[in-house]
Amino acid sequence: MMTFLRVILVLFLVQNTVAQSISGKVVDEKSKPIEAVNVYFDGTTIGTLTDKNGNFTLNFGAKLNSILVISCLGYNSEYITNFKPNEFLNIKLNMSVNVLREVVVQRDGFPREQKMEVFKKQFLGTTKHGKSTVIENEEDIYFAYDANTKVLEAFADNPLRIINNSLGYKINYQLVKFDCKLYPWTTKPKAVRNCYYAGLTRFESISNLAKIKKKRNAVYDGSRLHFFRSVAANNWKNDGFRLFIKSWEVNPAAFFAVKDTLDFKKITVTTNKYQPAIVKILAEFDLFRKGDQSKIIFETDTFFVDKLGNNSHSDKIYFSGSMSEQKVGDMLPMDYGIN
């Protein structure tokens, strides 16, 4: 699981260039073509399906060194990180082996209904968009809870089919990790201390109504995606982000050094000298924008941001406040607003 997770967290590298395409053919173990295979770039709306001959062509407007996902129900997914634009890929999918999971009934005082409640709140979110977002195949989700460590984990063998009518997206979400640490002193294990999830996503727009586009713009405005794009572009002032330390506004340039490379920005975070020595925490800041307040905690002094705004070290950068409320129900494709 962890090896796969490291692949998932590979930084998406993007370089603006002329329109590109990639083509290929997907076959099974007997070299027979497979129809209706999902082929997509993780976290984006850039995807397609194979035809009856197993062939596909995927056009995109920039050179992507992102994860190319090849996924089909009943087969083990394939992930390609190194490919050349305009090349032809021959891909073979192996049938997945269904292993019957042993169901162990534990008297942990934590019934499935409550576990699902915690999962949906932490995964979909509790905003108006999060509450209206639906997982069509909840039955594919199963849980493991350690009553000693107070850790709740969630798994799904099949991709989650998520419908977000509020923002006009259908999301195919391949859950890789869901790890939720709960507070130990509550009588009912529902109070969340911190939570982390990761996965592969394909977005499909199901509405282009003007009111839907307005909602998407409102969600993007001040979002984490907006923030990381702003950091990478060193555009704090124009984007309206203000950085504070203990109620004192500070110059972001004094704490966030941006170094240009060919395909991404390397961000170095200076340790906040006013930050008390706390285990793991290297820096902590308050972030304000248009009346919304968030707190950002860094357990890393370096991270990378690509030109889409995708950031590395997401498991070592924590948000609380306004930005922490944005879960999958408020998630936009990484290529949102990028021509």
Image (cartoon, rainbow, N blue to C red):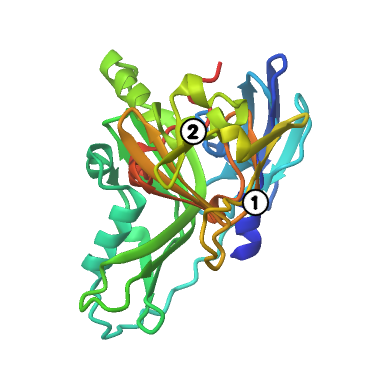
Residue 104 horizontal side relative to residue 280, left or right = left
Task: For marks 2 and 1, give the CA distance.
Answer: 17 Å
Residue 227 numbered mark, or none:
2
Of pointers 2 and 1, the one earlier in the residue sequence: 2
Q: Which amino acid does label 2 sit on?
A: Phe
- At a point 25% along the width and 41% down the height, the residue shown is 127
- Residue that mark 1 sits on: 301
Q: Quadrant of residue 91?
A: top right
The vertical placement of 317 against 129, above or below, is below
Quadrant (top left, top right, bottom left, bottom right) of the N terminus = bottom right
> Which x, y percent locates residue 319?
43, 49
Q: Is mark 1 on a helix, strand or loop?
A: loop
Please tell me which residue lies in front, 38 or 296: 296
Callout 1 amino acid: Asp
Quadrant where the C terminus is found in the figure: top right
Q: Give 290 or 6, whichever is nearer the viewer.
A: 290
